Amino acid sequence: MIKTGTIGEVDSVIDETIDKRKALLSQRYNNCTLLDRQFEILDVIKVANLCFFYIMFGSREQHEQLKPNQPYYLEGINILFDQVFCDFTKNEFAPTFLTQEVEKIHALIIFCGEIGFFNRIKDYCKYNLIEYTGKSEHKLCFRFVNRYMGLENLEIMEDMIRTEKIIKAQEEAVKTDSDQRAKITKRMRKYVKPRRKHFISYDTNPEIDEYYIRLAELYMERTFQFECFPGDVKFGGIPYSIYIRSAVLIISFALKHIAYAQLLTQKHRKIAFVNVLTINRDISEMVEVFCIACGISRNDARQVLDCFTLTYEKYSFHRRNMDYLLMPYIIVSKTQLVFSIAGALSGIYTFLMGELNRKFQKDWDRNILERESQFRNDLYNLFDDSLYIKIGHNLPVQSDGKTITDIDACIVEKATGQIIFFQLKWQEQYGRNIGRRQSRMQNFLRETNRWINDMTIWLGKKDRRKLASMLGLKEKQIDFDKFSLIVAGKYSAHFSGLDKPDDRAEWVLWLQLQRLYDEDSTTFRSLETLIKKLKEDNPYNRLPEQKGQLFHAKETDIEIAPYSAD
């Protein structure tokens, strides 16, 4: 039987659970020495890398075994980092040791992840995504407050569809590489050997390195976010292209190291994979590697390496601004850092963007001004030059001598005079952080709704001559009765928990536009056809039926029921 109650009672139950768990963590870590903390952080990173490997590259059985705990896993790493991460540079070196209690460390990560999950439930309530409906003996009950939930999942699906398309396009290149892989693997097998019986040592050669660079470049193509700046803009005096080259290099290190670790453990069955998948590297050695591979000075190499490395001084910034603490390198002593394959293959983009923003704020603010023109050019590439007039710059909109808004992009169909006015929104990604989502959502909707309103009022005046003059066209080239407004978001355009947005405009994700073009490029040969297609493809019309969700924890279960209008 479910008993009704107040949200205050929910907070009390959840806060008590969180406090008890954090108290247990404090007992575990409060009296830790610096060396103890080095052991703990390395254990966590090693087990995190192992689980990431199983999820990405493991067998179906390994993947299925980890799947139930994935909602808790990355949250748990964050909370464990909060407990044990500190200024490790006070110790000259980091320990090299065997991680032997993988299951115990894994359970600890899940224990912490459930703390993060309880905090997330509170945020869901705080930002009106779910509402409390009561409790039973061992369960807190909630339900979604709106029928439109899961819109962000559809946007994530757009990225997955794009990635699958790229993977398919890469099949021939991958097949060619696969043909070469047997030859490369044969050489690698000769180069890898045990170090101190339980660890790993290997050499390489230019052929092996180039092979994994090519694989890394293919891997990088699947991540469209890296295209966020032109290669020639600079951060800290170094071109963005060098940072991207370095990211490719790091990804190649990860793919190559995984292959070497697999080869070693195949040859030596007594060596545990968890103890060779994660390695410590000397900072001076990595500076030299970046220096040579990127053709830059040592000072520049230090700066680039630092942009992929978590240090104690940066911790609070990235903890606030990253969903999950996944970065390629983590300082673990004065002279050493640990290499995380999870960070290299998953968190590398988010961490790099955060660092460029944090370290080079003026450069960042200047360079993001280039984004609008880049977005506009990418958008225009979907439209045939022979069919459309494309306005290649931002257009200020004036009324009574005052600028009331602006138009980021504008396309005029030559045959019909039909016009589309675009508002282009390139916000930073908010990931799974509910508070950050709320802030980005409010800014996004405030600006776009104001733009739609201002444009509707201005266009309602039907000043054909002023519009033609603003566009640099003749009046006969435009049809004032055929115009549409489109809000296009680079990373997000739809938000769960809200009613449908202002229908005076079409709201579309950039990846959604790309998918529609790939499915049928003729859609973009007529603006009338395109607008009709966008209405049909509206995510609000494609949401799956809501299903209840049940989460188990030792203290209490959490049940979230589907939305009900009753």
Image (cartoon, rainbow, N blue to C red):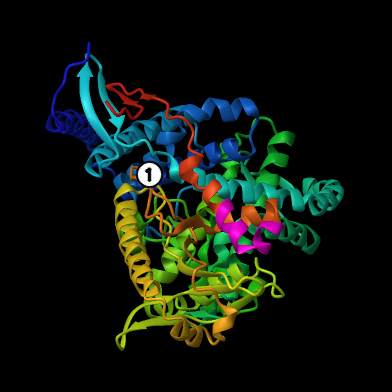
Name above or below for residue 242 compared with residue 163: below
Q: Kindly tell me whether residue 221 is visible in this rendering.
A: yes
In this view, 210 is above or below 273: below
Pointer 1 residue: 496
Q: Quadrant of residue 247?
A: bottom right
Residue lying furthest top in this view? 1
Residue 312 visible:
no
Residue 488 image point, x, y percent: 48, 62
**As rendered, which of 450 and 556 lies closer to the eye?**
450
Q: Position of residue 538 (x, y in %)?
A: 50, 47
Q: Is residue 514 left or right of residue 485?
A: right
Residue nearest the observer in this picture, 421 or 104? 421
Magenta stretch contains residue 529: yes
Q: Is 195 drawn above or below residue 551 in the view shown?
A: below
Measuring 55% from the left and 57% from the top, which residue is drawn there?
A: 531
Q: Position of residue 108 (x, y in %)?
A: 37, 32
Q: Amino acid at mark 1?
A: Ser
Q: Is residue 462 above or below residue 122?
A: below
Q: Residue at x 78, y 64 (%)?
A: 206
Residue drawn at 68 percent across, 30 percent down: 269
Q: Secondary structure at mark 1?
A: loop
Magenta-highlighted residues: 522-533
Left or right placement of residue 316 versus residue 342 in this view = left
Quarter of the picture containing the C terminus is top left
Left or right placement of residue 139 versus residue 390 in this view: left
Does the magenta segment cover residue 559?
no
Q: How many residues crowd around disc 1 within 10 Å: few (fewer than 14), some, or many (20 or more)?
A: some
Judge from the rendering whether residue 546 lies leftward or rightward of residue 294; answer left or right.
left
Looking at the magenta stretch, what is its main secondary structure?
Answer: helix
Q: Nearer the viewer, residue 477 or 115?
A: 477
Percent from the top left, x then y, of residue 100? 49, 31
> Residue drawn at (27%, 27%), measured in percent from left and top?
142
